[in-house]
Amino acid sequence: MYHAIVERRLRNTLARLSRGDIAYVTAQFAEPLRHEFAGDHALGGRRESKAKVDEWYARLHRLFPDLRFEVDDIHVSGWPWNTTAVVEWRDFFGLPDGSAGGNFGVFVIDISWGSVRRFSIHTDTDRIKRYFADFARAGVDEALAAPITG
């Protein structure tokens, strides 16, 4: 039963992120935390404070205001004080030229007593870098900004 509740909550959180509700998403995190996205790009790096996670999600929303996720599968294991969830997903968004973009990947999430303590994003970072190069050519300077870390 507990695992089903965690799965439902994760699906709800991604649905709310897809609607641009970043305040709801960031409220799921509690310090100490680790939020990381591999790659050398504007969304890459590691954040270890709630303030930096808030900044990161604000940037995500500015770069991809119409971002939406489709969940393929969720795997949950562990107890309420030490839960790990793996979310397999696909995402979709508009590009500056009006065409559609997207990616796929996995989130690995550690949860303790209902709060996210670790969130790792695993996706095709080369694809992200290519999209950001296109964004920059279209005048979206933040696509080439330094990662938010700290």
Image (cartoon, grey):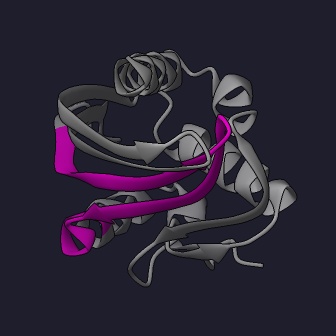
Task: State which region is magenta.
Answer: 101-128
Quadrant where the C terminus sits is bottom right
Q: Name the residue rendered at 86%, 56% in the picture.
A: 51
Residue 91 in the image: state x and y as whole percent.
25, 36
Is residue 24 found inside the magenta-colored segment of the image?
no
Q: Judge from the rendering whether residue 51 lies leftward or rightward of residue 7; answer left or right.
A: right
Q: Judge from the rendering whether residue 119 lies leftward or rightward of residue 138; answer left or right.
A: right
Quadrant assignment, res 96? top left
Residue 95 in the image: state x and y as whole percent.
30, 40
Q: Main secondary structure of the magenta part?
A: strand
Vertical placement of residue 13 versus 104, above or below: above
Q: Judge from the rendering whether residue 75 lies leftward or rightward of residue 29; answer left or right.
A: left
Is residue 126 found inside the magenta-colored segment of the image?
yes
Quadrant assignment, res 108? bottom left
Residue nearest the viewer, comparing 60 with 141:
60
Quadrant where the N terminus sits is top left
Residue 121 in the image: state x and y as whole percent.
38, 61
Residue nearest the viewer, comparing 116 with 124:
116
The single residue placed furthest to the bottom in the displayed view is: 40
Q: How many marks?
A: 0
Vertical placement of residue 137 versus 40, above or below: above
Residue 29 in the image: state x and y as whole percent.
71, 45
Q: Name the residue rendered at 31%, 72% in the picture.
A: 129
Q: Name the residue rendered at 63%, 79% in the picture.
A: 146
